[in-house]
Image (spheres, rainbow, N blue to C red):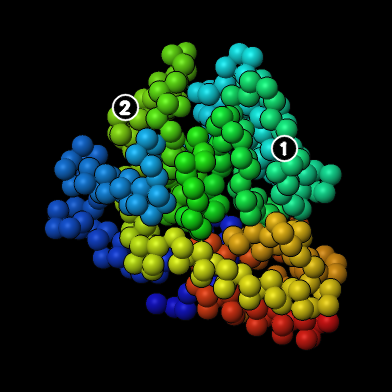
Amino acid sequence: MTQRAYNFNAGPAALPLDVLKQAQEQFVDFNGAGMSIMEMSHRSAQYEQVHEETASLMRELFGIPDNYHVLFLQGGASTQFAMLPMNLLRPGRPGAYIMTGSWADKALKEAKLIGETAIAASTEGDRFTRMPDPSEIRIPEHAAYVHLTSNETIEGTQYAVYPDTGSVPLVADMSSDILSRPVDVSQFGVIYAGAQKNLGPSGVTVVIIRDDLAAESPEGVPTMLRYSTHAKNRSLYNTPPSFSIYMVNLVLKWIKSNGGVAAIERQNREKTDLIYNVIDASGGFYRGVAHPASRSRMNVTFRLGDEELEKKFVKESEAEGFVGLKGHRSVGGLRASTYNAVPYESCKALADFMNEFMRRYG
């Protein structure tokens, strides 16, 4: 095998090498079945064991209470932007959205197509470089739910503390930081996440939803877009994304073998500190985008003096084996996505490259 790239892609993103090797070993013949898991019926005993074990591992590692369903759906978080309001909005009860960047905005736009919405808080005035303080959040009377994006991948911001929304269900898009740190799941009514950053490959979306909310799906919602449909059928109403779920199973076992979510959080802090420390010690050569109190542990965003120097940084980094350091096309700049499976060694190599680049061009 050639040397693996320093993969800082924002998604699909790095997967643990151990997981990829195990999947490779089982790709043609899964556990002596004489076929790949991709070829199996989703009604077979072999697949159902993987399916149920994956849900059980999610519960164990993320501390999911018994009164929540764990669903494996398709369509990514972008489908959840619409599926959520279709299931939870009611006449006279708006969905309240906290506006923190590009993904929160996409969620709001979809909800507006479904029903009544309101903005509970916004950091647009600060160019979405920070998360709001809890004191800034205003929840409308009779709100159906409060929606937030826990980590904004494009701007590089992340909630340090989640707001207390009282009796109003809190809904979180955790696509880019799920299982990167311990979370009190009971604080939320719904958590959803596309898998392709911290959980596995693209193709499956995990939805963690409280029982009472899953049971409230209006009959007018198409069958496949009702949470109640998938909750009643254990995410087996139709053919699930079986190979993606199998890969999530392997990633969850990898997290467990590495000490669980608390240990992963410590590793993530150590990794990103390497990069943030270079930025902070650079005397302004590198400029962090996010306010320090809102810095993401998943997406480190930064700028250089001008766009030409940033282009040079990307070009020279690619020559050294780094992948994915160009910022999102909508905002430019530079970004290192340091999800769970990005190894410490990759972040150390990036920090060393940044120091050397600064030595030559600073």
Work out whether residue 287 or residue 293 is closer to the camera in this orientation and state it. Answer: 293
Task: Give the number of marks.
Answer: 2
Judge by depth and name the residue closer to the eye, 302 or 11.
302
Question: Closest to the observer: 24 or 137?
Answer: 137
Estimate the x, y position of residue 48 in percent, counting from the top left: 22, 42
**Residue 116 figure quarter:** top right
Q: Which amino acid is tagged 1?
A: Ile
Residue picked out by circle 2: 232
Q: Amino acid at mark 2?
A: Lys
Give the side of residue 143 with respect to residue 344, left or right.
right
Instruction: Report if residue 20 is visible in the image.
Output: no
x and y percent of residue 119 in the render? 73, 31
Quadrant where the C terminus sits is bottom right
Image height of 28 relative to 169, above or below = below
Q: Quadrant of residue 30?
A: bottom left
Can residue 167 be seen in the rendering of this structure?
yes
**Outermost residue to the front:** 166
Q: Residue at x 53, y 62 (%)?
A: 339
Sequence-wise first label, 2 or 1: 1
**Mark number displayed over residue 137:** 1
Tell me the quarter of the image containing the N terminus.
Answer: bottom left
Percent of width and height locating residue 9: 57, 61
